[in-house]
Image (cartoon, grey):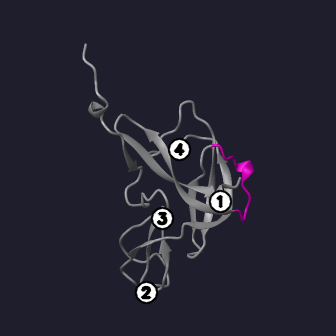
């Protein structure tokens, strides 16, 4: 009989579900967006190319970290399975989504709310903070996604 030592079990690594959209800093994750150096327009998710503002002629966007906090602008309960790269739980369970207006930038970023928090727990104007959560796992990875959680852990 062969006994496997703990060291022979492959380590599971944490990996963002979408590369380059957020930092993997557990204590203080941030969204990664872009800012136009000419007019100050912010963009999320990050991209290259021209400024999206119709009043600006800049042909560059600079990568920048976005606010970690904001307030709920709108929210809903998602009652259908998400598109790839997200993986729905089996059996599928509805989950809340929040559109959060970022504190400094004023732009609105949509994101999942942590499991166990329902749309009925949310309200417009509620203070939210960016956190990381596990979307799903396989034999080698935990796939990490950003979520909007009530600030200070309040429900």
Name the residue tied to disc 2. Answer: 38
Name the residue tied to disc 3. Answer: 30
The majority secondary structure of the magenta stretch comes to: loop
Q: Residue at x 73, y 50 (%)?
A: 121
Q: Position of residue 20 (x, y in %)?
A: 38, 60
Nearer to us in this view, 14 or 59: 14
Q: Position of residue 11 (x, y in %)?
A: 32, 39
Mark positioned earlier in the residue sequence (1 or 3): 3
Q: Residue at x 42, y 66 (%)?
A: 46
Mark positioned earlier in the residue sequence (3 or 4): 3
Tell me: 78 left or right of 19. right
CA separation in Å, label 2 and label 1? 36 Å
Foreground tag (1 vs 3): 1
Q: Residues within 10 Å of mark 4 (few under 14, many from 20)?
A: some
For the residue labelled by badge 4, is the local secondary structure a helix, a strand or a loop? loop
Q: Quadrant where the N terminus lies? A: top left
Mark number, residue 82: 4
For the residue labelled by badge 1, is the local secondary structure a helix, a strand or a loop? helix
Name the residue tied to disc 1. Answer: 152
Mark positioned earlier in the residue sequence (3 or 2): 3
Foreground tag (4 vs 1): 1
Nearer to us in this view, 131 or 91: 131
Q: Residue at x 36, y 34 (%)?
A: 139
Magenta range is 116-126
CA separation in Å, label 3 and label 4? 23 Å
């Amino acid at each position: 009989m062969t006994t496997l030592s703990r060291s022979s079990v492959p380590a599971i690594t944490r990996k963002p579900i979408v590369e380059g959209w957020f930092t993997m800093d557990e204590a203080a994750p941030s969204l990664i967006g872009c800012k136009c150096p000419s007019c100050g327009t912010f963009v999320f998710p990050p991209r290259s190319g021209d400024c999206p503002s119709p009043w600006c002629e800049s042909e560059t966007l600079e990568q920048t970290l976005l606010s970690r906090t904001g307030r709920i602008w709108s929210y809903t309960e998602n009652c259908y399975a998400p598109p790839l790269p997200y993986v729905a739980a089996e059996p599928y369970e509805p989950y809340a989504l929040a559109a959060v207006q970022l504190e400094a930038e004023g732009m609105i970023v949509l994101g999942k709310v942590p499991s166990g928090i329902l749309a009925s727990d949310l309200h417009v104007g509620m203070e939210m903070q960016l956190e990381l959560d596990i979307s799903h796992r396989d034999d080698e990875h935990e796939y990490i996604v950003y979520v909007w959680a009530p600030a200070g852990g309040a429900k």
